[in-house]
Image: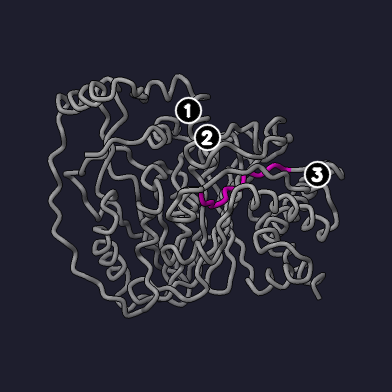
């Protein structure tokens, strides 16, 4: 029985039913030889690698201390691994409509905080895997996202038989209270931060979130002023709309080689240009000085960290949507991100990929943790970019063709953008408030058009 950290408890108690915090992902696979049964068996066999995924959150009576992780005696893998389908031959729009509905539903707090959907009915027999994981489960690279342990670098990876698991009995109320009191007696100088304190002092909790998840926001100049007014900050509802975009990694590298900067700088430039065109399509006034402030989580390494990239810092970056010249936009963003890299000791793509083979699901979750503590006044949207391996990966022998991250919306924000590169391609996942940014599919199309325009300038 392990107690939740203050940070993890804050994620749970500040989460609202109409603003779920879970990170999602969409994996599109070739037809698995054993069908959906093979994928379901894979999940069951790999659960021992993520023991937290068979534990639930147990509250301490009276909120005398943070909740604890405890084995779920009623754990049922079939509840968490669900099967679904789209009408054959399923279109991308039908799949994304299903993803949007799945993402909008909160996780059940009385069960382990994850779900996985196996979706059939796609063209050519392909299947999709939709994952939902609460960031409270992913507190670092030691506790990874469920999507990360399903993938292998070979289609012939060994699949062990599922282990027989016996949950430990749930602790009773007296034991929970007694343990909380004992911890306080043993550490009288430590403040036992309770859930009630997290709720009644949200501002202080938010500051702790920012500090614990990634250090204080270092863009002090930007933080002194509220984020610009934007339709991205419309009052958010409970429903979501998910859209996707794709790009060739070679095209991104061609732009970088022609105009400078990094791959991440080019991707931010693409998002910036698409946001500019999207604002104009809505009849918004876009002046030369107009900007949109993005919170950009970056994997960093501290002075004494043994594992690089396991910590994520939050940076505020003003995206120059008012700049009409894409090359100038790239130069401005490269300059801004160069300061982030030098100050924060950011970890390069090759290092991240070498950590665990396929870290994007986990690192997107860490990015969501870093973003959660920021006020809606500080940023208009969140943009996460996590590089993945440039070789094929497999699940139950089926090759993964595409992977789209779906990052949760921060309170008061209508859009988040998750970016992942894999096997020579770049995949954008856009999660939007259905009421405020219902035309998010337009923005996804503009992302692809913006990159095509930049490629033309690269010759």
Q: Is residue 17 visible?
A: yes
- Residue that badge 2 annotates: 373
Q: Residues within 10 Å of mark 3 (few under 14, many from 20)?
A: few
Asked if the residue at tag 1 contacts the one at tag 2, i.e. Cβ–Cβ closer than 8 Å, the answer is yes
Element under disc 2: loop
Asked if the residue at tag 3 contacts the one at tag 1, i.e. Cβ–Cβ closer than 8 Å, the answer is no
Q: CA distance from mark 3 to mark 2?
A: 32 Å
What label does residue 392 carry, if any? none
- Residue that badge 1 annotates: 205
User: Is 449 above or below relative to 197?
Assistant: below
Q: Work out whether residue 338 or residue 136 is closer to the camera in this orientation and state it.
A: 338
- Give yes or no for residue 301 being in the magenta stretch: yes
- Give yes or no for residue 71 being in the magenta stretch: no
Quadrant of the rendering where the N terminus is positioned: top left
Image position, residue 174 (x, y; %): 15, 24
User: Which residues lie in the magenta part?
Assistant: 292-302
What label does residue 283 carry, if any? 3
Q: Residues within 10 Å of mark 2 (few under 14, many from 20)?
A: many
Element under disc 1: helix
Residue drawn 79% across the image and 66% down it: 259
Residue drawn 61% across the image and 41% down it: 414
In the displayed structure image, the side of residue 253 where residue 391 appears, left or right:
left
Q: CA distance from mark 2 to mark 1?
A: 7 Å
Element under disc 3: loop
Q: Is residue 101 visible?
A: no
């Amino acid at each position: 029985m392990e107690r939740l950290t203050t940070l993890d408890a804050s994620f749970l108690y500040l989460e609202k039913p109409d603003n779920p915090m879970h990170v999602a992902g969409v994996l599109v696979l070739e037809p698995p030889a054993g069908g959906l049964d093979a994928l379901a068996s894979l999940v069951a066999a790999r659960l021992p690698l993520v023991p937290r995924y068979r534990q639930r959150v147990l509250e301490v009576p009276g909120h005398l201390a943070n909740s604890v992780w405890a084995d779920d005696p009623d754990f049922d893998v079939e509840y968490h691994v669900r099967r679904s389908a789209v009408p054959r031959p399923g279109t991308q729009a039908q799949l994304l409509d299903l993803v949007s509905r799945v993402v909008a539903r909160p996780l059940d707090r009385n069960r382990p905080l994850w779900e996985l959907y196996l979706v059939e009915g796609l063209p050519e027999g392909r299947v999709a895997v939709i994952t939902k994981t609460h960031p409270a489960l992913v507190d670092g690279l030691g506790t990874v996202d469920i999507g990360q342990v399903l993938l292998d670098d070979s289609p012939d990876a060994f699949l062990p038989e599922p282990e027989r698991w016996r949950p430990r009995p749930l602790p009773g109320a007296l034991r929970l209270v007694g343990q909380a009191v004992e911890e306080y007696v043993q550490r009288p100088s430590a403040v036992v931060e309770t859930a009630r304190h997290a709720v009644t002092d949200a501002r202080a909790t938010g500051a702790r979130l920012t500090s614990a998840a990634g250090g204080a926001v270092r863009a002090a100049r930007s933080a002194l002023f509220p984020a610009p007014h934007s339709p991205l900050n419309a009052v958010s509802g409970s429903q979501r709309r998910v859209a996707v975009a794709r790009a060739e990694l070679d095209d991104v590298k061609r732009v970088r080689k022609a105009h400078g900067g990094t791959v991440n700088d080019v991707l931010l430039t693409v998002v910036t240009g698409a946001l500019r065109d999207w604002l104009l399509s809505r009849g918004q006034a876009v002046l030369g000085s107009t900007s949109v402030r993005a919170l950009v989580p970056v994997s960093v390494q501290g002075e004494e960290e043994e594992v690089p990239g396991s910590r994520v810092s939050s940076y505020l970056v003003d995206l120059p949507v008012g700049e009409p010249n894409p090359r100038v936009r790239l130069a401005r963003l490269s300059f801004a991100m160069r300061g982030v890299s030098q100050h924060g000791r950011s970890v390069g793509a090759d290092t991240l990929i070498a950590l665990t083979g396929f870290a994007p699901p986990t690192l997107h979750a860490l990015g969501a943790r870093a973003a959660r503590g920021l006020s809606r006044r500080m940023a208009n949207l969140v943009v996460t970019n996590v590089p993945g391996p440039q070789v094929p990966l497999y699940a139950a022998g089926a090759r993964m063709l595409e992977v789209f991250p779906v990052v949760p919306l921060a309170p008061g924000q209508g859009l988040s953008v998750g970016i992942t590169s894999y096997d020579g391609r770049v995949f954008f996942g856009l999660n939007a408030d259905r009421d405020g940014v219902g035309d998010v599919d337009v923005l996804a199309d503009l992302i692809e058009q913006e990159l095509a325009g930049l490629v033309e300038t690269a010759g």
